[in-house]
Image: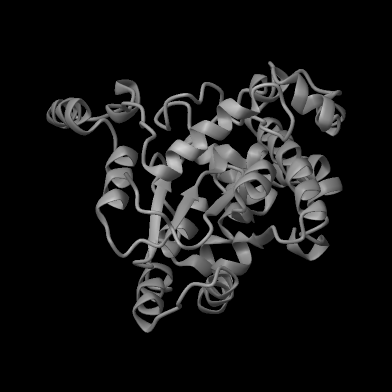
Amino acid sequence: MLKKAVKKPILLTGAPRSGTTFVGRMLDLSSSIGYFHEPFNVQFGIEGIHENFIYIYEGMENEKYYENLLCDLLKGKAKYKRAPLDVVNQDKPLFIKARNYLGRAIIKSKPNVNYYKVKLTPSIERYFLKDPIACMSSEWLHRKFNMDVVILLRHPAAFVSSLKRLNWRFDFRHLLNQPDLLREHPEILEIIKDYDVKNLSIVEEGALWWTSIYTVLFKYLDRNPNMIAFRHEDISNDPFEKFKELYEHLGMDYTPQIQEKIKDFTDNSNPTIAEKNKVHVLKRNSKENTKVWKKKLSSEEIRLIKEITEPVAKRYYSEIDW
């Protein structure tokens, strides 16, 4: 069982590929933080979550069910799922597959190991959920569990460029199969009404997905003044000052040791471009990384992304950002 945290939990969220893994790891440099990796992830999150991007809200019929799941998570009673073999063994050599199979049998998954580490670490005084999959439920988590919610956003073109590099696709059924979400946020249907969501290019799909997610998240920000947003580009261009700002907002000590580690991860001597199929490359030339999409996308792709996302994106990205 986890010891009782003395400070309120933190949720770091936003669309997938918005920088939550990188920023999450930089916050996890603090020894006082207990890191929970994507508990809302259907593949390897906690047992009891059956739908990605689930919309949980106050007053819903089965709200108590989800409240109990989160209470168990924060009390150390939750159970993480065993990592799917097709995920841990994807494109791996035979000896790596054998190792992963054994590890999966013994420890279930890396998130499960992280969870147990938190249980065994006496310095932990605050729990930290890094979870873009929880984005649609972030307002509920903020209000129900008094979580400090930080929303990350990334330039729409950089977001789509990242999806193209990994050939990641999103299934709009995650949103369209949730009638409560569509009733409370009908803008999602308005965004996609002119498109056949079953036959989208990866560029259209990414742009529509970005717009749908941040349409909802910006509403959350407007009606919850204690929820805050950070642009991935601002953090990348000035990591020292922006992480200082973020640490201070969360009431965390921004120690010289943490600053030195952040410098190591963001230094301009690090590579700028990630390998094609590598999902997370944490040590990057953070400033140059923000410009990679301009080289990877065609002018027509950029025009299309801007056309789809600008009605929402203009809140944080002006003409000069394109």
In this rendering, the count of numbered labels is: 0
- In the foreground, 111 or 75: 75
Q: Where is the N terminus found, in terms of image quarters?
A: top left
Q: Where is residue 168 in the image (x, y as percent from the top left)?
A: 52, 32
Q: Report whether residue 19 is seen.
A: no
Q: Residue at x 57, y 30 (%)?
A: 66
Q: Is residue 186 above or below residue 257?
A: above
- In the foreground, 217 or 33: 33
Left or right: residue 40 compared with residue 149: left
Q: Where is residue 216 in the image (x, y as percent from the top left)?
A: 76, 41
Q: Is residue 288 above or below residue 71?
A: below
Q: Where is the C terminus found, in terms of image quarters?
A: bottom right
Q: Which colour scheme is used?
A: one colour
Left or right: residue 60 compared with residue 116: right
Left or right: residue 192 compared with residue 267: right
Q: Position of residue 27 (x, y in %)?
A: 45, 63
Q: Is residue 28 above or below residue 52?
A: below
